[in-house]
């Protein structure tokens, strides 16, 4: 059932994303719109080969296709508040790797993330919101007492933690990470500048 890779390596995919972000930052986005976008929609109607998986926050200001200046069919996107990865989100990522052949996974946190801010402040929430905050809490613990901005430190730690966890995840992703075929990177998006920074 597994499909071949998309033909775009993890390194090439990352280069493509970062150069797209550069255009976005500069206000020089090139992706098709109007008739060209309709044409692309038709071309993709029966198949998709997204070259990257983006795991990012649901925040309305961080839409990956715009940030990376790409179009229909380019990104397989999983978005939750605080880019929290639960079992269903993980299964979605695994689907892209196993069946669509995507070789790069980017876990992207962002500046002034509301979910991380709520977790830092220890806010009391109802419904299922506490589940989101609980998932972010290890990053809060980890960065307690660090110098600098508490929320920003936690945002970065949260993205790094999720990326690290994905590297060892399950029977699909972990073996491909080991062979170097799949790469997982953590990233930070600046709301102020539009720039995506890779986290070490
Ligand atoms: Zn957020």
Image (cartoon, helix red, strand yellow):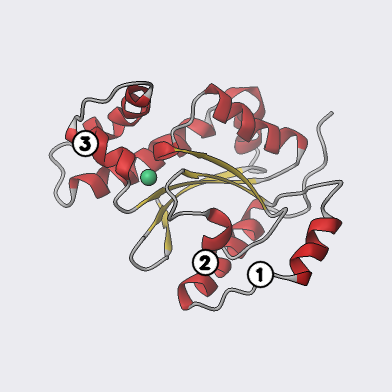
Residue 131 position (above or below residue 165): above
Quarter-wise, where is residue 141 in the image?
A: top left
Rendered-image quadrant of the N terminus: top right
Label 1 packing within 10 angstroms: few (<14), some (14-19), many (20+): some
The image quarter in which residue 101 lies: top right
Residue at x-position 78% and y-position 45%: 5
Q: Position of residue 195 (x, y in %)?
A: 42, 65
Q: Quadrant of ligand 1?
A: top left
Residue 120 picture location, percent across and down: 21, 36
**Left or right of residue 98, residue 59 in this image:** left
User: For the residue labelled by badge 3, is the local secondary structure a helix, a strand or a loop?
Assistant: helix
Q: Residue at x 59, y 63 (%)?
A: 15
Mark before the other along the chain sequence, 1 or 3: 1
Assign a secondary structure to mark 2: helix
For disc 1, the marked residue is 31
Does 178 sit above or below residue 13?
above
Residue at which label 3 appears: 120
Q: Can you tell which mark lies on residue 21?
A: 2
**Residue situated in front as seen by the camera: 100 or 116:** 116
Determine the CA span between mark 3 and mark 2: 29 Å
Few, some or many C-alpha atoms within 10 Å of disc 2 (few <14, some 14-19, many ≥20)? many
Residue 199: x percent and y percent?
40, 52
Q: How many marks?
A: 3
The residues bearing labels 1 and 3 have C-alpha atoms spaced at a distance of: 37 Å
Disc 1 vs disc 2: which is toward the camera?
1
């Amino acid at each position: 059932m597994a499909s071949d890779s998309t033909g775009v390596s993890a390194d090439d995919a990352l280069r493509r994303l970062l150069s797209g972000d550069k255009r976005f930052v500069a206000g020089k986005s090139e992706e098709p719109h109007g008739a060209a976008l309709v044409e692309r929609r038709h071309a993709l109607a029966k198949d998709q080969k997204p070259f990257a998986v983006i795991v990012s926050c649901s925040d309305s200001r961080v839409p990956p296709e715009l940030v990376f200046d790409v179009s229909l069919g380019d990104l397989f996107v999983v978005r939750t508040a605080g880019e929290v990865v639960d079992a269903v989100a993980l299964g979605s990522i695994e689907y892209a790797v196993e069946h669509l052949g995507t070789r790069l996974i980017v876990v992207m946190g962002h500046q002034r993330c509301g979910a991380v801010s709520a977790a830092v402040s220890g806010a009391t929430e109802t419904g299922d919101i506490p589940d989101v905050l609980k998932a972010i809490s290890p990053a809060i613990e980890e960065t307690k007492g660090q110098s600098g901005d508490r929320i920003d430190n936690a945002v970065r730690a949260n993205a790094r933690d999720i990326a690290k966890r994905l590297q060892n995840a399950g029977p699909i992703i972990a073996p491909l990470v080991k062979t170097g075929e799949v790469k997982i990177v953590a990233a930070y998006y600046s709301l102020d500048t539009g720039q995506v920074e890779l986290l070490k």
